[in-house]
Structures are given as structure tokens and as C-alpha cells.
């Protein structure tokens, strides 16, 4: 695992956006062979999306041949609902760049057939040759996508019930009213994420320090689903100093030294 420690949120956001652009351009995607990018929602990636839009506007990258798969969606929210992840992605990213609608993949929270929706999502990822780079965030309890504590580390796309603490954390997007936060979601599994060629998780802020500590120094455990990243051959965590504040000084020194000559 690589752990890249940057001074603050802005530096993390810019670094990840530049890395995404570097990976897309290096891949030289075509219509027949698009670059497949996994994408997160939440507060953490907003700065990265802003920077990606800047880089697109400055002609550093084109999304014409980029296919995206989002991690999750609330069950029962229409794409036009401002709290849906469809709406989030449209507003924060898709409408600002030249991505083709047929290349955008998101789970349908209004589906009547969950099993079919989840199976066809997995199939669509496979059909495009798998995800090249999955960018993610993490919950305070260490969940990736909506894989709450005790999710199987080999799980696939499916329905999940949210924990009270995740609904509480996400209530800030629902007028701070937990009762408005849906209790069920569709989410890709930990196994789905781990199948990606590379997984990069952004972790910023003091409130994520415990999750980061478990991810890097803890045991691999379904209690902190982020810890599955330890099993990935190309797992990267990019974090700020605040999130890294609960790592041991030895761990911090090791990764800082390890990264000093890297991208
Ligand atoms: C939600 C999302 C996750 C995200 C997490 C943290 O639960 N399903 O993908 O990583 O929130 O969000 P934030 O970045 O707002 O802290």
C-alpha cells in the first residue's frame, strides 16, 4: 500500500485530480477502449471534481472516451432529487465536462428489481474490461462506498441498510434531518472495488483519523471495510496531515520517506 500524506485538503484534491488526468492520458483511451474510472460522492471529492473541471477547461484532459461507474445510490431517490447521487454527479462534474451520457454508469435507486440492477452493473463493469482506477472516500467508521462495518470483504453490488451513524453523518446533506436520509442503498461491494486495477482512497480531516489508522495500521477486518485495501496490489491512500494524526510517528516517517521521489 502507498500512503501519500499532503499538508491539507486543497493539496490532496489537486493531487488526485492531476493523477486522474495523468492516468487517463497515459491510457490513450478511444471510443472502443475507454478509460474506466470509478467515482465517489460525498463532501471529500468535491475539491477534486472542481480541479478536474479546471484541468478540462485548460485542455489538459478530455472525458470523451472516459467511462465512469459510481459507487452507490440511495434507494427511493429520483435522479432529479437534489440529495440523490445522480444529481450530485451531474451538478458537481458531468455537466461541466465532455463526458458522453452513454459512458456514465450509476445505480438506479428507483429500480423495482434490485437483483437485476446489481447484476447488470457488475456485468457492465466487466464488459468494459474492469475499472482502471477507482477513486473513493471513507466514512468515519471506515466504510468504503456504502459497505458498512461487517460487510463481507468479498461482497458484490447489492442492497445495504445504512447504520444510524452513517445516516447521522449524511444528514448534513438532508437539512440535518436524519429522518430524511434513506435507510437503504444500492452499493458496489468491497469485492467489486478490489477488482479494480488501482484503488485510490482520499481521506481528509481529523474526524477520519481513526478510519485511516485502522486502514493502515489495523488488521484486515470486516469491522473497518477500508482495511481490505491492504490486500490490493495497487492500493493508494492519499490523506492530509489531520487525517494522518493518529498514525504512529514511525509509520508517518516511513511513508513520507517512501514517497519523497514519487509522482
Ligand atoms: C458516504 C458515501 C461514501 C463516502 C462517505 C464519506 O457514505 N457512500 O462513498 O466515502 O459518505 O463521505 P464524506 O466525504 O462526505 O465524508
Image: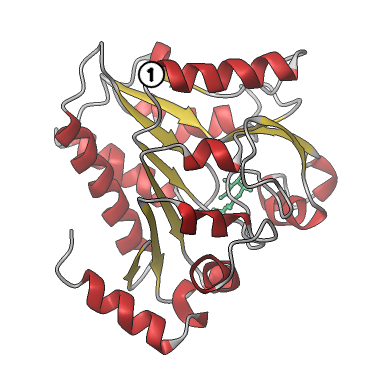
On screen, residue 139 versus residue 253, left or right, reads right
* Image height of 118 relative to 138, above or below: above
Coloration mode: secondary structure
Pick the residue in front: 235 or 40. Answer: 235
Q: Which residue is mark 1?
A: 128
Residue 145 locus on image (x, y percent): 59, 44
Residue 76 versus residue 263 in the image, above or below: above
Q: Quadrant of residue 252?
A: bottom left
Q: Residue at x 21, y 27 (%)?
A: 62
Please indicate whether residue 21 sits to the left or right of residue 161 in the image.
left
The answer to whether residue 249 is left or right of residue 212 is left
Q: Residue at x 38, y 61 (%)?
A: 1
Quarter holding the C terminus is: bottom left
Q: Position of residue 47 (x, y in %)?
A: 39, 51
* Residue 97 image point, x, y percent: 31, 27
Q: Is residue 126 left or right of residue 81?
A: left
Whether residue 216 appears in this view of the structure is yes
Residue 33, percent across and down? 26, 17
User: What residue is shown at x 28% (from left), y 77% (from top)?
Assistant: 256
Amino acid at each position: 500500500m502507498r500512503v501519500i500524506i499532503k499538508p491539507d485538503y486543497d493539496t490532496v484534491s489537486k493531487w488526485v485530480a492531476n493523477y486522474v488526468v495523468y492516468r487517463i492520458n497515459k491510457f490513450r483511451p478511444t471510443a472502443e477502449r475507454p478509460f474506466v474510472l470509478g467515482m465517489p460522492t460525498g463532501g471529500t471529492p468535491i475539491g477534486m471534481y472542481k480541479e478536474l473541471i479546471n484541468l478540462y477547461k485548460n485542455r489538459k484532459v478530455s472525458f470523451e472516451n472516459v467511462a465512469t461507474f459510481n459507487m452507490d445510490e440511495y434507494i427511493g431517490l429520483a435522479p432529479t432529487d437534489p440529495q440523490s447521487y445522480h444529481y450530485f454527479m451531474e451538478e458537481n462534474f458531468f455537466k461541466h465536462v465532455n463526458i458522453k451520457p452513454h459512458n456514465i454508469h450509476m445505480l438506479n435507486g428507483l429500480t423495482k428489481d434490485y437483483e437485476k440492477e446489481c447484476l447488470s452493473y457488475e456485468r457492465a463493469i466487466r464488459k468494459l474490461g474492469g475499472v482502471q482506477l477507482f477513486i473513493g472516500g471513507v466514512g468515519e467508521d471506515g466504510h468504503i462506498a456504502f459497505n458498512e462495518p461487517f460487510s463481507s470483504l468479498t461482497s458484490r453490488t447489492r442492497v445495504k441498510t445504512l447504520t444510524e451513524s452513517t445516516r447521522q453523518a449524511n444528514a448534513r446533506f438532508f437539512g440535518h434531518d436524519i429522518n430524511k436520509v434513506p435507510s437503504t442503498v444500492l452499493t458496489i461491494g468491497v469485492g467489486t472495488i478490489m477488482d479494480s486495477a488501482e484503488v485510490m482512497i482520499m481521506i481528509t480531516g481529523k474526524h477520519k483519523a481513526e478510519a485511516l489508522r485502522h486502514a493502515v495500521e489495523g488488521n484486515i477486518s470486516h469491522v473497518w471495510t477500508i482495511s481490505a485495501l491492504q490486500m490490493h496490489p495497487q492500493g493508494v491512500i492519499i490523506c492530509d496531515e489531520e487525517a494522518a494524526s493518529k498514525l504512529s510517528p514511525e509509520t508517518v516517517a516511513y511513508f513520507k520517506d517512501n514517497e519523497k521521489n514519487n509522482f
